[in-house]
Image: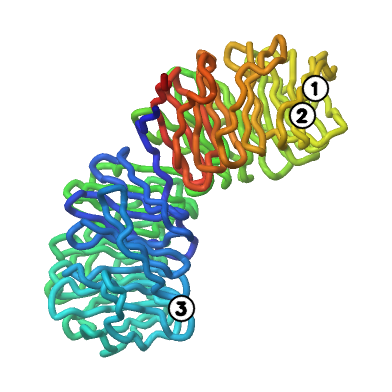
Amino acid sequence: MAELLETYACAPSTERGQGILISGDPKSNSILYCNGRSVIIRYLDRPLEVKVYGEHAYPATVARYSPNGEWIASADVSGTVRIWGTHNDFVLKKEYRVLSGRIDDLQWSPDGARIVACGDGKGKSFVRAFVWDSGSNVGEFDGHSKRVLSCAFKPSRPFRIVTCGEDFLINFYEGPPFKFKLSHRDHSNFANCIRFSPDGNRFISVSSDKKGLLYDAKTGEKIGELSSEDGHKGSIYAVSWSPDSKMVVTVSADKSAKLWEISDDNTGNVKKTLICPGSGGVDDMLVGCLWQNDYIVTISLGGTIYIYTASDLEKAPLELAGHMKNISALSVVKSDPQFILTGSYDGLLLKWVQGTGCYGKLERNVTSQMKCFAAVEQEIVSTGFDNKVWRSSLQGDQCGEADSVDIGNQPKDLSLALVSPDLALVSIETGVVFLRGTKIVSTIDLGFTVTACAIAPNGDEAIVGSQDGKLHVYSVAGDSLNEEAVLEKHRGAITVIRYSPDVSMFASADANREATVWDRASREVKLKNMLYHTARINCLAWSPDSSMVATGSLDTCVIAYRLDKPASSRVTIKGAHLGGVYGLGFTDETTMVSSGEDACIRVWKVTAQD
């Protein structure tokens, strides 16, 4: 059996030039955000506690708790809204196709009976409000000519709905049934976010024109604005009210968050400016915010979540980092203390410590995307899509200077001789390249299409996998290879090869969903019938004592096998990662870490079944 110990959540999906609208539930002190097809639930007072809802067929865009906290409505780019329970394994209650295009925002009515959603649609259908348990419409929403970026429901009677969007308009609707009442064109650029105050007296809109405007919640008339003195110098992407309705927090492309005191005469003056502790690059633009209980949450374009204590703003914020894209490589680095290193498709390297979570981003002076990497205690060797192999020293919590070598072909796989990691074997389509440091020792054409490779820890043997499913075993003599054996068992292209830590065995896996464990000395199959995945196997890992081997697949599952038991007594983790498992490692004999397409990392306790 396998027990989930920890989940290190992905970061919120962000887009340059666009805000993200996050929400939360004050009762459980949790927040909701989206990444890919996942909706992430995180708890502000216990950030390592994470839940993931992954039932959308298309990338999710926004999610909101119902007023009683029992239901969550989440929307996606296809215009679909799914309403599901926060307990009982996220049981699906209803699903509706609400708009013909992407949904950007949605809100519940304060009585929990209706939902309004807005976004992109065909014709003029950019906004729709409906009864959530029947799907029937509750009004007509005319007045917008372009995509509607944000909508809000007045939290008290008489009910009102307000919307804003790319046509610069603020529209005001009365109901139910809702009908157009009035429109304002006070903004001179995209109106990005609109929110009612919790007491139901006012609402505020913020825009890419750097302004925030205040309106009367009952009549819709403009009554004030945020002061331009000490105001934002860039587009304002999101706004959130304090629980007592006396202040708002705004976030901007100028990389700052500002707290504004809203006076009785409806002017807003800056009380505090929060500069997030990033490096000042584009990724430090702030695109989302939420004020919940005593927490102020801001989100950067790079996906970092900053959690401030509202009652003590001098205190440094808690930073939660994560991957935004598919994690393409994972390595457990056996140092003191031991840590987990993950690299995503977009080139981001993150360091994780079990029990702590993200330990920090490793800054690389390499901007290329990352395909795969291997890590030892003091060094990271990585390959990208630029035909280069990079070596970076690992100094403390950062990567040192990186050296690279262009091997003239797209690297397919990478393996280090762990006893002398200066020696690396890189596979390319036509053969392999031997590297010492960043010097090419030899490039060998093998005469077949290469798909995977592994080099023995002491560098005396290499195994190369081919497109036709054969494993070629070579002895390494200086800078050349001598073929010793060809092993035929697989019926699909070899995807991964790994030596066991005690070097007495090696394991291989293929695109036809089969894995095999081989005895290294006799080259006989040691564990067979490992054919329990339903799709390509992407990754493979050994436990430190060589007693267990685990495989991760495109079918979203991880399967662990014990060498002293038949393959049928395996441990299967179903749905380990939405979209597929791409990284696996062991931190000790029974603790396994996995990563995948969903940009999350999970730590599992695996105990063998009898």
Q: How far apart are marks 3 and 2 (CA)?
A: 52 Å
Percent position of residue 11, x then y: 42, 48
- Is residue 77 shown left or right of residue 530? left
Query: For residue 143, what is the image quadrant?
Result: bottom left
Q: Residue furthest bottom?
A: 181
Which element type, helix, strand or loop, lies under badge 2? strand
Q: How far apart are marks 2 and 1 (CA)?
A: 7 Å
The numbered mark, 2 or 1, whose residue comes first in the sequence reads: 2
Which corner quadrant holds the N terminus? Answer: top left
Percent position of residue 256, x then y: 36, 57
Numbered tag placed on residue 309 in the rendering: none
| Amino acid at pointer 1 | Val
The numbered mark, 3 or 2, whose residue comes first in the sequence reads: 3
Q: Name the residue under label 2.
A: 470
Numbered tag placed on residue 121 in the rendering: 3
- Identify the residue shown where x is 54% and y is 43%: 555
Percent position of residue 203, x then y: 22, 74
- Is residue 244 shown left or right of residue 118? left
The numbered mark, 3 or 1, whose residue comes first in the sequence reads: 3
| Amino acid at pointer 3 | Gly
Kindly check if marks 2 and 1 are in contact, taking CB atoms under 8 A apart as contact.
Answer: yes
Q: Can you say whether 28 is above or below 220 in the image?
A: above
- Is residue 374 shown left or right of residue 450? left
Q: Name the residue under label 1.
A: 486
- Identify the residue shown where x is 13% and y is 69%: 199
Q: How far apart are marks 3 and 1 (CA)?
A: 58 Å
Q: Can you say whether 561 is above or below 162 in the image?
A: above
Q: Which of marks 3 and 2 is in front?
A: 2
Which element type, helix, strand or loop, lies under badge 3? loop
- Residue nearest the observer in this picture, 213 or 350: 350
